[in-house]
Image (cartoon, grey):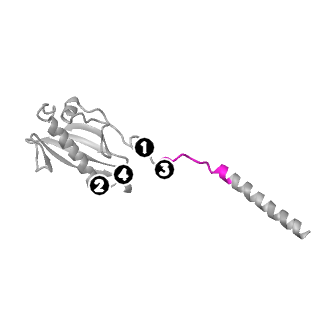
Amino acid sequence: MGQKSRTGRILGGLVGAAVAVGLLSSFCERRPKSKPTGTPDPVEAVHFTGDTPNDVRALLDGLAVRSKIGAWYVTRSWIQEKRLLIELSRQSSGFTIYVTTTEASYAPPPHETARYHVFYGGFRSWNDSGNVQASETALAVGDVVERIRRRENEVPIPAGM
């Protein structure tokens, strides 16, 4: 009796373990590899406001709201107090590029073209993971400066500047 019942118990235990593993694996649904849950698509995480005025779009060589520069999206561009403001954002942070004519400039600029001074600042972050990196802002600002240089002698100064 001892040998037969011992073998039965072992087989029963193995069958039970196999059933448990099968049930467990059916509950653990396999998902295709994708971004982690809770991480929004970068475009969905950014709020776009308005359209870029045509004269500004011409000066910026086609750059407009919804355009992407490196890791940044142009979320807003407008003219206020003789300055062109270009707001750049990504999932959890943003900053602003300010463009003035050389006559309207109030301080030495970090970037200069023949007719314009280009400043940047207004850094903002909505959570700890959204820190603005200098290298990322430098690429975006440099792109805007190059766009202005390509077009500034071909297009008029945008209205309001």
Residue drawn 88% across and 69% down? 3
Q: Which residue is mark 1?
A: 41
Query: Residues under labels 3 and 2: Cα distance?
Result: 23 Å
Q: Nearer the viewer, residue 135 or 7?
A: 7
- Of pointers 4 and 2, the one earlier in the residue sequence: 4
Does the magenta-highlighted stretch encompass residue 25? Answer: yes
Query: Residues under labels 4 and 3: Cα distance?
Result: 19 Å
Q: Which residues are magenta?
A: 24-38
Query: Residues under labels 4 and 2: Cα distance?
Result: 14 Å
Circle 1 packing at 10 Å, graded few (<14), some (14-19), many (20+), is few
- Of pointers 4 and 3, the one earlier in the residue sequence: 3
Q: Quadrant of residue 66?
A: top left
**Residue at the right extreme of this rendering:** 1
Give the total number of marks visible in the rendering: 4
Kind of residue at disc 2: Gln
Q: Which residue is mark 3?
A: 36
Q: Position of residue 83 (x, y in %)?
A: 17, 40
Kind of residue at disc 1: Asp
Q: Nearer the viewer, residue 4 or 57?
A: 4
In the rendered view, does 19 fall on the left or right side of 108? Answer: right
Residue drawn 28% across and 38% down? 76
